[in-house]
Image: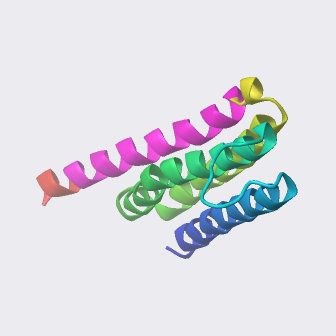
Amino acid sequence: MELVAIVTLLAIAEFIIFGVQVGSARGKYGIPAPATTGHEMFERQFRVHYNTLEQLIIFLPGLWLFGFYIGNTWAAGIGAVYLVGRVLYAVSYVKDPASRGRGMLLSVLPCWLLIIGGLAGAIWHLIST
């Protein structure tokens, strides 16, 4: 499960980096805490970070359950697509929110694959033992 652990830690590092970018934008555009609005570029960074948090709630359990029941190499590969998708989402969303589609697709589809695969694997394991 080392590959799954590596992808997990990379996903968390990616989330931390997005958080640092929010903090940087907060300072750059003079948005005092706890405000979450005020300048469009800050709001874009904030939304990238928050949306990534929303996706992590789905991604991480799916990644681990898929890795356990289906295979960790496949889980890590699908997880790598998620990581790339999140970067593409972040870059495109900050540039122009309307262009975020491809990055969103490359991060949402892996989440669903991992969740469905993990669930199917758990059910299969349950009924076959």
Residue 129 drawn at (x, y percent): 12, 61
Question: How many numbered discs, if any?
Answer: 0
Q: Which residues are magenta?
A: 101-124
Query: Does residue 103 sit above or below 78 in this rendering?
Result: above
Q: Main secondary structure of the magenta part?
A: helix
Residue closest to the eye, 73 or 80? 80
Q: Residue at x 29, y 48 (%)?
A: 119
Left or right of 101 on screen, residue 62: left
The image's colour scheme reads rainbow
Residue 58 drawn at (x, y percent): 43, 50
Residue 33 drawn at (x, y percent): 65, 61
Residue 7 sits inside the magenta stretch = no
Left or right of 17 on screen, residue 57: left
Q: Residue at x 71, y 40 (%)?
A: 89
The residue furthest bottom is 2
Q: Residue at x 70, y 59 (%)?
A: 32
Residue 1 drawn at (x, y percent): 49, 73
Left or right of 114 on screen, residue 30: right
Name the image quarter holding residue 110: top right
Q: Residue at x 63, y 35 (%)?
A: 104
Residue closest to the eye, 21 or 13? 21
Residue 120 sits inside the magenta stretch = yes
Residue closest to the eye, 36 or 75? 36
Query: Does residue 108 sit above or below 25 in this rendering?
Result: above
